[in-house]
């Protein structure tokens, strides 16, 4: 179990209890050691979760505490709101839709004061879509699906000088550089990693096969190559 999931379950186990919950019972439920429970409780207390109690006695949430399923400070919430707005403005339709749905779920469990602050964020990313931007958004959706499904793609691509080429690629990731997206790939034509801008992809076709996660040409190798490239600049 991931540590983040374990901390979430500890808070849920303590929510609404009238009596202290023994650490040993928590350890049994989470299938971890007592030492792990004590360390997790201490970390939660340091992060501001109002947990009272001690080892050998048990733990409960401080009387009068109202802990929502997700806890955010006002600054953290503004970062989430800003992130959602940027995704809606610059990502594909699918990711924008899901980001907005996630924010609605988060705001639904917030205390009223934090919910009001989230609506007052003054960080904006205005949505402007002409036909070309709509084309790019749809292309991002298609590329995103191919990355997730590990589908080989055939790209009709135009470079910065307008020259057209056709490439067969293994799509590894999408990256946003502040002004443009790039598709990180293993290019079967060049036998090397290559980046392609979605706004320069004239057409994108499924090659009818999937690719394996091979050493030397997978996402980890791509990221290492990009880091070396930019560190050397």
Image (cartoon, rainbow, N blue to C red):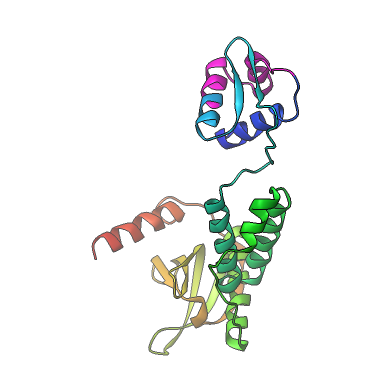
Q: Nearer the viewer, residue 52 or 28?
A: 52
Q: Residue at x 56, y 25 (%)?
A: 41
Indicate the quadrant containing the N terminus: top left, top right, bottom left or bottom right: top right
Q: Residue at x 41, y 83 (%)?
A: 159
When asked about the image quadrant of residue 125, the answer is bottom right
When asked about the image quadrant of residue 129, the answer is bottom right
Image check: 30 left or right of 215?
right
Q: Nearer the viewer, residue 54 or 116?
A: 116
Q: Position of residue 161 (x, y in %)?
A: 38, 89
Q: Residue at x 63, y 18 (%)?
A: 27
Q: On screen, 90 above or below 111?
A: below
Q: Which residues are magenta?
A: 19-40
Indicate the quadrant containing the C terminus: top left, top right, bottom left or bottom right: bottom left
Residue 113 inside the magenta-drawn segment = no
Q: Position of residue 115 (x, y in %)?
A: 67, 55
Q: Residue furthest top?
A: 56
Is residue 185 something that shows in the picture? Answer: yes
Q: Position of residue 17 (x, y in %)?
A: 75, 24
Q: How many marks?
A: 0
Q: On screen, 100 above or below 199?
A: above
Q: Residue furthest left?
A: 232
Q: On screen, 218 above or below 51?
A: below
Is residue 150 something that shows in the picture? Answer: no
When asked about the image quadrant of residue 103, the answer is bottom right
Magenta span main SS:
helix
Q: On screen, 3 above or below 21?
A: below
Q: Nearer the viewer, residue 189 or 118?
A: 118
Q: Position of residue 151 (x, y in %)?
A: 59, 63
Q: Residue at x 55, y 63 (%)?
A: 82
């Amino acid at each position: 179990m991931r540590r983040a999931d374990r901390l979430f379950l500890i808070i849920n186990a303590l929510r609404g209890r009238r009596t202290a919950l023994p650490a040993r019972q928590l350890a049994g439920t989470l299938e971890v050691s007592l030492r792990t429970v004590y360390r997790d409780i201490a970390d939660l207390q340091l992060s501001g979760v109002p947990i009272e109690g001690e080892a050998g006695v048990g733990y409960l949430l401080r009387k009068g505490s109202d802990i929502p399923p997700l806890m955010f400070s006002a600054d953290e919430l503004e970062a989430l709101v800003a992130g959602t707005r940027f995704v809606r403005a610059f990502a594909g339709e699918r990711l924008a839709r899901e980001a907005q749905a996630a924010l609605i779920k988060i705001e639904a469990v917030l205390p009223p004061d934090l919910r009001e602050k989230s609506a007052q964020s003054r960080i904006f990313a205005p949505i402007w879509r002409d036909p070309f931007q709509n084309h790019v958004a749809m292309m991002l959706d298609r590329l995103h699906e191919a990355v997730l499904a590990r589908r080989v793609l055939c790209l009709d691509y135009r470079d910065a000088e307008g020259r057209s080429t056709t490439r067969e690629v293994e799509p590894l990731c999408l990256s946003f550089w502040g002004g443009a997206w790039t598709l990180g790939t293993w290019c079967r034509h060049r036998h090397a990693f290559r980046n392609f801008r979605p706004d320069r992809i004239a057409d994108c076709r499924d090659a009818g096969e999937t690719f394996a996660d091979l050493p030397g040409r997978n996402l980890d190798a791509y990221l290492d190559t990009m880091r070396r490239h930019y560190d050397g600049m």
